[in-house]
Amino acid sequence: MIRKYFLLAITLFSISAFTQTSSFYKKSDTLNPKRRNAIAITESVMAGGALIALNQLWYKDYPRSGFHFKNDNNDWKQMDKIGHFMTSYYVGKVGMEVLDWAGVSKKNQLIYGATYGFAFLTAVEVLDGFSDEWGASPGDILANAAGTGLLVGQELLWNEQRITVKYSFHQTDFAKQRPNTLGENYLQQALKDYNGQTYWLSANIWSFNKKSSFPKWLNLALGYGADGMLYGNSNTGNAMLQNPYRQFYLSLDLDLTKIKTNSEFLKSVFSVVNFIKIPAPTIEFNTKGGLKFHYLYF
């Protein structure tokens, strides 16, 4: 399920980058009702259309049930929950940025824009709740709220995003063993193989001390991943086939949006791809008791 959320976030983020960098769509200094109304209609249509499409293309092939919850907090070493966290953060961030483009007040950006990710993802959980195959996940809802909380909290505290959520991926051998679940090609694996995914909190060093001599684009990143997973629940086939474990990382990163350029095209590209963690030297600690150094970690 997380692959659908992830693609939605990237699509919306691309739209946001275009509205911010295109000379025709420069930010309005005051409230522009036409832009605000266009955003409200567009987001409503997109969200409603996405939910209808999910209901028709995904859920209709599975038995319905009364609304119920399902505790899946132990699945995939919580990697899917981090995916919810990231998606909620970015969909809310886009919601804020497009309202900012329309000249909407910061207060209303936080109320109606930053919460867009949480609202949409929670609506999907409701659909899950009426499916006999799944069930609404309290852990997913909590992760959605945490992603929105990181976004809103930083705006209230610093009026900017000093810490962003990022993603990186490398291929693993596990996908070859369960291609239907973990992906048959690179793109599918990037969205489905949790063994190769790493999620990061990337903090911009300069933003915490703007009088320092640190480069404005330099970040320090903390990452989380997991490995050894062929099945979601460690109580099923994982224990017999592999030894799933958690991984924690410390690395450097770049904030591409703080790289100076006069090119509107490059600004747009940097804004869109800034969710990707830049490969860099990395220290790994894992729960198998290992300490590793990666010259260049993806």
Image (tube, rainbow, N blue to C red):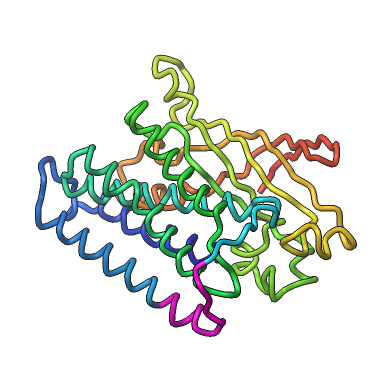
For residue 249, which quarter of the picture? top right
Q: Looking at this rendering, what residue extends furthest in the right direction?
A: 240
Q: Position of residue 244 (x, y in %)?
A: 80, 52
Residue 1 x/y as whole percent: 55, 66
Residue at x-position 69% and y-position 76%? 180
Q: What residue appears at the point 51 percent right and 37 percent down from the top-left corner?
A: 254
Residue positioned 56% across, 45% down in the render = 277
Q: Residue at x 18, y 46 (%)?
A: 27
Left-right relation of 211 to 197: left
Q: Is residue 72 magenta?
A: no
Question: Where does the image place residue 66, in percent across and percent down from the top left?
Answer: 51, 73
Q: Residue furthest top?
A: 211
In the picture, measured across the screen, residue 265 lies left or right of residue 90, that is: left
Name the spot of residue 148 as percent of width and height, x first: 42, 44
Residue range (magenta): 53-67
Q: Nearer the viewer, residue 182 or 258?
A: 182
Going by the image, does 188 lie left or right of 247?
Answer: left
- Above or below residue 9? Residue 251 is above
Does residue 71 lie above or below 180 as drawn? above
